[in-house]
Amino acid sequence: MSRVRLQKAEAIVLKRHDYGEADRILTVYTRQQGKITVIAKGVRRIASRKAGHVELFTHVQMMLAEGRNMDVLTQAEMIDAFPRLRDDLVRMTYAYHIAELVDRFEQDGHPSPQTFQLLRDSLAALGDADDPFVVARYFELRYLSLIGYRPHLFECAQCATALEPGGAVFSAEAGGVVCPACARTVSDGLRIDDAAFRVLRFLQTREIGVILHLVLQPGTRGQVEQALHGFVRHHLERELRSVEFLNGLRRVARTVDLAPSARARPDTVDAGAGAERSGDPLSELP
Ligand SMILES: [Zn+2]
């Protein structure tokens, strides 16, 4: 009888899909191996004890057995389910967004302890922050730096002269903010105001604990999001499904009095861009 090789993996579940009668294939980001795909057998049966431990976006200690095509999940023990995420569609959508970014940018089997930690901390922060929007933008800026696409925000992305406040132009093509002289040479320049410029710099250089209570004005939110989504789209050469989903949610929130974000404070509601609406009727008051 051949011995099955077992190994531990500390993982975050990025994606899953059903397979066969009762199995599920999970895409996970692990501290030890980076992104990998594992099969969880029998996990869709009602009596499965592993099922609750491998929900989307859970932080879980796994025991894996080497399989022919992919590793097989033999045991799963929950470390953190991030419960504050789960009752809120907007927070869950942002969790889906950061998981999708990692899934799209990562290749299998390239571990990065910093990426694992950023992913874990950001999922926790998405449950705790006053405004999950800020955490999503923080994640994008920090993650882009970790994978070698750090947007230039302090020196011109094209000629490297130090950038002055006021009248910044963001260019995904150039790799960040460009100086006024270089702004005339880029084809995808996006003018951002001073507040948006300062928020981008702030999120790129601060620790996650500092941003949990950050609240942005609607106009600033729109510019920061447009700059970063343009940047991500430029590098992935495609739109993210989570972005389309979030835009759909926003359209619904504009037309119906739907209330996805129960804990959002009134001043985090982006009425101008038709963003998240608060579930608390009191927050609709001026
Ligand atoms: Zn320049």
Image: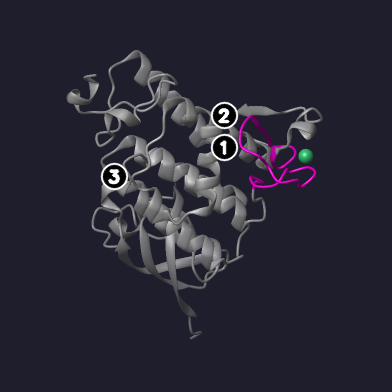
Along the viewing direction, whichever of 282 and 23 lies nearer the viewer:
282
Q: Quadrant of ligand 1?
A: top right
2 or 3: mark nearer the eye: 2
Query: Could one spot residue 196 in this view of the protein?
Result: yes
**Residue 193 numbered tag:** 2
Q: Residue furthest top?
A: 255
> Is residue 160 rendered magenta in the image?
yes
Tell me the mark number nearer the camera, choosing from 3 and 1. 1
Distance between mark 2 and mark 1 Cα atoms: 6 Å
- Tag 3–tag 1 contact (CB < 8 Å): no
User: Horizontal and vertical percent for residue 111?
Assistant: 57, 67
Contact between labelled residues 1 and 2, with CB atoms less than 8 Å apart: yes
- Residue at x 37% of width, y 37% of height: 215
Quadrant of the image containing the C terminus: top left
Q: The disc labelled 1 sits on which kind of residue?
A: Phe
Tag shown at residue 197: 1
Asked whether the residues under the numbered discs 2 and 3 touch, taking CB atoms below 8 Å apart as contact, a structural biologist would say no
Please tell me which residue is depicted at 31% across the width and 65% down the height of the picture: 79
The kind of secondary structure element at disc 2 is loop
In this picture, is 229 found above or below 286? Answer: below
Pinpoint residue 10: horizontal percent, then vertical percent: 42, 68
Q: Which residues are magenta?
A: 151-177
